[in-house]
Amino acid sequence: MPSAGTSASSPAASGSSAGPSPAGGRSSASGVAQVTAELIATRRVGAYQHLTFVAPGVAEPARPGQFVALAVGGPTSAYLLRRCFSIHKASPSGTYGGTVDIVVAAHGPGTSWIAGLPLHAEVGVVGPLGRPFPLPREPVPCVLVGGGYGSAPLFWLAQQLKARGCHIEMVLGAASEDRLFGVVEARRAADGVRVTTDDGSAGSKGWVSDVLPDVIRSSKAAVVYGCGPMGMLRSVTEIAVREGAVAQVAVEESMACGVGVCMTCVLPVVGTDGQTRMVRSCLDGPVFRGDRVRWDAFVDGYCSVPPGAVGAPGEGGH
Ligand SMILES: Cc1cc2nc3c(=O)[nH]c(=O)nc-3n(C[C@H](O)[C@H](O)[C@H](O)COP(=O)(O)OP(=O)(O)OC[C@H]3O[C@@H](n4cnc5c(N)ncnc54)[C@H](O)[C@@H]3O)c2cc1C
Ligand code: FES
């Protein structure tokens, strides 16, 4: 099995193996910038809004899998918390300087405000945050699985994997056709693309997990990268492990600060010492090796501290 869980390209990437001391100084904060970014393009893509910001200092160090945190509501806003978005693409240089693209599904007050921003609006952006997808050292076959807007960071990842000589298959899934993101781009970026929708409005009817085993087997994939809802990431991990591949998944836990201060984003991850610890997905993730995440701790979208985790209350404890 190739050493798919580590990368020479980024010091942060090696941390995705969820080592024994998740909080022990493996800061991903180097190269993080806080800038006022100008919106230079905004367009509707199906159910989503695709936005491009000039964000010099954020674009240059960014890697696929990292995210940005945007201040919402404008300069006099009472919206306290920033909102986090995967970086869809980062272009370090260009006419405008470094640009960062995000893809937003408007559903609550913050995402609706961002999706409705007019051209040339200025927004506070912090990034790049978190750890990127680790890249395999060898040119191995890879499958990239995206659910809904979760596919947004995968095209950029595909380019980097291609540049390393990897064969790329993509599997994109969503509830319906308008909630798929990037099918055309996927056909350019990957050697093969499978599309699924829950309602059958595009591609084959069903879930990404229905077609994934076949795609892994036929491509002899060594690594499966995933980004999307937690339930999908759990299935992707289970299938990858069953088929003998390594899963690297970008989780989307609720994040109140995005920079390691508030502890709202913790999830249980097994370290190399076999111990489960609650780690911050904004700092130690969002990318984790799928088989290290304690998926059993998630019930109905809520995560609890599983028994046996370091610091968990014991029987009769508090
Ligand atoms: C790493 C990461 C990448 C993401 N990428 C994308 C993307 O590419 N595209 C996209 O559309 N969305 C993405 N999201 C989700 C996006 O951040 C949320 O949909 C957004 O914050 C919701 O804001 P809202 O005001 O519209 O909705 P609301 O649901 O009203 O959220 C309000 C605020 O409360 C916070 N919050 C809610 N519940 C909790 C909780 N239990 N604990 C702590 N804080 C909480 C939210 O994070 C948010 O800051 C990503 C999230 C993360 C963590
Ligand atoms: S979001 Fe605040 S610590 Fe991770």
Image: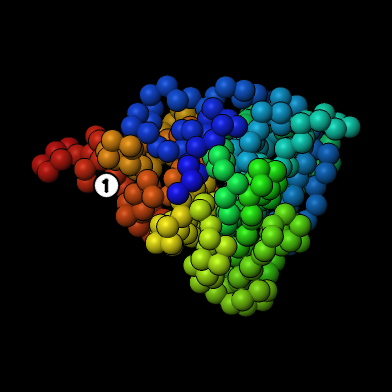
Q: Is residue 148 visible?
A: no
Amino acid tagged 1:
Pro
Say left or right for 300 vs 139: left
Q: Residue 180's x, y, as percent?
A: 66, 63
Say left or right for 109 vs 278: right
Question: Which sits in the foreground, 237 or 251?
Answer: 237
Q: Residue 51's x, y, as percent?
A: 75, 45
Question: Which sits in the foreground, 290 or 104?
Answer: 290
Q: Which residue is located at x 51 percent, y 53 percent?
A: 222
Q: How is the image coloured?
A: rainbow
Question: Which sits in the foreground, 318 or 133?
Answer: 133
Q: Which residue is located at x 63 percent, y 36 percent?
A: 63
Quarter of the image for the C terminus: give it: top left
Q: Which residue is mark 1?
A: 306
Q: Which residue is located at x 27 percent, y 47 percent?
A: 306
Q: Residue 275's x, y, as percent?
A: 27, 38
Q: Quadrant of residue 219?
A: bottom right
Q: What secondary structure is found at the residue carrying circle 1?
A: loop
Which residue occupies the extreme left position in the image? Answer: 316
* Numbered-mark total: 1
Question: Which sits in the foreground, 84 or 232?
Answer: 232
- The answer to whether the beta carbon of the residue marked 1 is less than 8 Å from any atom of ligand 1 is no
Q: Which residue is located at x 89 percent, y 32 percent?
A: 95
Say left or right for 97 vs 299: right
Q: Is residue 6 visible?
A: yes
Q: Residue 164's x, y, as percent?
A: 66, 43
Q: Answer few, some or many: residues within 10 Å of disc 1's Cα (few below 14, many 20 plus, some between 14 and 19).
A: some
